[in-house]
């Protein structure tokens, strides 16, 4: 989504954030009025706070946190290359040199 404020200024927004800005525009810039919006028939009404309705943030389990910590340590200690693609390219280069 784009929203131009001036001819040479263009701001990029996610669709949900663009909906929030539209709701603020509809309510004359008042976030209090957006929260009190009486137009329940509006298709944008559930999105008026700038968030997707019904989406709950997931909490990472202790096992997931531990796995991520170990992977980060391995990467920092150099046991895992930064890019698996670079490792693949090295293997291909060695194979071409042998031919």
Image (cartoon, grey):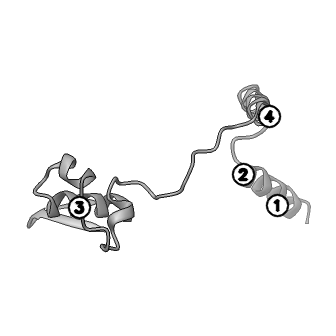
Whether tag 4 and tag 2 are in contact, CB under 8 A, the answer is: no
Whether tag 2 and tag 1 are in contact, CB under 8 A, the answer is: no
Residue tagged 1: 92
Please give left or right for residue 54 compared with residue 8 in the image: right
Q: Which quadrant, please, contains the C terminus? A: bottom right
Q: Is residue 98 shown to the viewer in this render?
A: yes
Choose the circle earlier in sequence order: 2 or 1.
2
Q: Report which quarter residue 15 is drawn in.
A: bottom left
Residue tagged 2: 86
Q: Report which quarter residue 37 is drawn in.
A: bottom left
Residue at image point 75% right, 26% down? 73
**Furthest residue to the right?**
98
Where is residue 97? Give x, y as percent: 85, 59
Residue tagged 3: 23
Q: Report which quarter residue 34 is drawn in.
A: bottom left
Of badges 4 and 2, nearer the viewer stands 4
Label 4 residue SS: helix
Label 1 residue SS: helix
For the residue carrying disc 1, how many other residues have a C-alpha within 10 Å: few (<14), some (14-19), or many (20+)?
Answer: few
Whether tag 4 and tag 1 are in contact, CB under 8 A, the answer is: no
Label 3 residue SS: helix
Of badges 4 and 3, nearer the viewer stands 3
Please give left or right for residue 78 compared with residue 55 in the image: right
For the residue carrying disc 4, how many other residues have a C-alpha within 10 Å: few (<14), some (14-19), or many (20+)?
Answer: few
Choose the circle earlier in sequence order: 4 or 2.
4
Q: CA distance from mark 2 to mark 1?
A: 10 Å
Residue tagged 4: 67
Q: CA distance from mark 3 to mark 1?
A: 54 Å
Residue 48 or residue 3, whichever sits in front? 48
Residue at image point 46% right, 58% down? 52
Residue 36 or residue 2, whichever sits in front? 36
């Amino acid at each position: 989504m784009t929203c131009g404020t001036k001819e040479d200024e263009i701001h990029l927004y996610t669709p949900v954030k663009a909906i929030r800005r539209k709701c603020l525009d509809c309510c004359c810039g008042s976030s209090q009025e957006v929260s009190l919006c009486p137009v329940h028939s509006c298709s944008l009404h559930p999105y008026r706070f700038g968030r997707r309705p019904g989406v709950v943030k997931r909490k990472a389990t202790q096992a997931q946190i531990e796995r991520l910590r170990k992977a980060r340590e391995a990467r920092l200690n150099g046991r895992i290359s930064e890019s698996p693609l670079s490792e693949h390219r090295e293997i291909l280069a060695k194979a071409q040199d042998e031919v």
